[in-house]
Amino acid sequence: MSEKVSAKTMVANQKTVQTKIKKEPQRAQAPLAAPTATPATTLNARILILSPDLNNAMLGRQAVDLALRVRAEGGHPFIASPGGLLKLELQRQKIPHKMLPDMRASALGHMVAVFQLVRWAREQHIHFIHALDFSLSRFAYEVMLKTGMHTAISLNQPVISVLAGRNAEVLRSFSRVIVPSSYAREQLLQQLGLPESVVRTIIPGINLGIVHYDRISPQKIQTLEKNWQLPDDQPIVVVPDCPLDPVVFDTMAKTLKELKERNITTILFVPEQDRAFILKRVAGFGLSSHVIVTSDIQDRIPALWLAHTVLVTGFQGQESLRALIEAQAMGRPIVAFNRNGLGEILLRDNATILLPADQVNRLTAALTRSLKLTTEQRQAFAVRARAFVENNFDRKQMIEDIIDTYRELREIQN
């Protein structure tokens, strides 16, 4: 390892880089899509935003942000969800909302939730629904049939992969389908036969404020260092989207063993329901001393700040895309597989490596090269990468794109 930098030093250097970024803005490459001009007319629509669960920090906050943007455009937002911690925020913002029973608990719960939402939608004279997640597609479809409203649905990448080759009658009933990448769009168009006019590509955006050192808090980062017993004098690799397939994971484990032999720590993020399974495999490969397995998504951004290199596999769909954007916003060198649209949002740079999706055998060499970058190279990349994210992946632009989709639905409804 030609350049060993402690995690604490990396954090301090990154804080310095954050101040430089504002002084040295530069476009790393052309934007992926030109910003859409906002029409002068108001969004004269009553829009129901259907969120899976407001307890989900990402989707819950997105539902509230969309509702506030609809109101700012002259529309009337409504939010429905099977519960959540943001209820007080909805009350504070005076956003009309309805807490539904958990439609996944039982067939009766599903039926009651449909009945309640149909009745509420009619009472409020709502024009159309936007379901923020595929888990609500059947639910939204039944509400649409009973009310005659037009409907949009957002699909994440794993769902699109599962749907490939299956019957798409439910999807064909939606007026708009929103996907996170051009790759996903082509998959839907070719394999599910959806009309081109129906499928919209809206690349995920992030709140740039939350990927700033001062917003994360040094105390949070130091707490993670202590809890995970991270070494001060060895590099750290963070994998925000650990593969869960046994064959894929076991192949990646060979690289993790080589990292262990060089005393390099790896942090794996996995869904809670899969944590025990991954822990068992980590122990089976003798990696427990150098591999940390965590399921707390709230730790992802602080963990990325501690990373010397970030490996993004693409196996968790939209979460992979968002994690890749976050890592670039924080200036972390990247190794990524060209899977599920990751290649569309990765800055091509000497501090990033894009591997073919099926060439896991090249992972060790790629991580070794990435970890050998000097502090000066990392800091220079951080400036370029942050500018790249600011130019292309601001959450405000994502919301603008969704608002444009709402305008389209309103025109269809008219």
Image: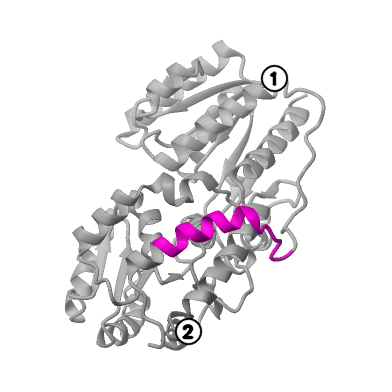
Residue type beneath disc 2: Ala
Residue type beneath disc 1: Gly
Q: Which residues are magenta?
A: 12-29
Q: Which mark is residue 49?
A: none
Tell me where residue 242 sits by quadrant.
Answer: bottom left
x and y percent of residue 353 in the render? Answer: 55, 78
From what the image shows, is residue 231 above or below residue 105?
Answer: below
Q: Which mark is residue 366?
A: 2
Tell me where residue 285 sits by quadrant.
Answer: bottom left
Name which residue lies at 51% across and 18% down. 95
Q: How many numbered dots are placed on residues in this image?
A: 2
x and y percent of residue 273 in the render? Answer: 26, 55
In the rendered image, the quadrant that contains the C terminus is top right
Closest to the observer, 203 or 21: 21
x and y percent of residue 80 in the render? Answer: 47, 26
Residue position marked by numbered label 1 in the rendering: 74
Q: CA distance from mark 2 to mark 1?
A: 50 Å
In the rendered image, the quadrant that contains the N terminus is bottom left
208 relative position to 226: left or right: right
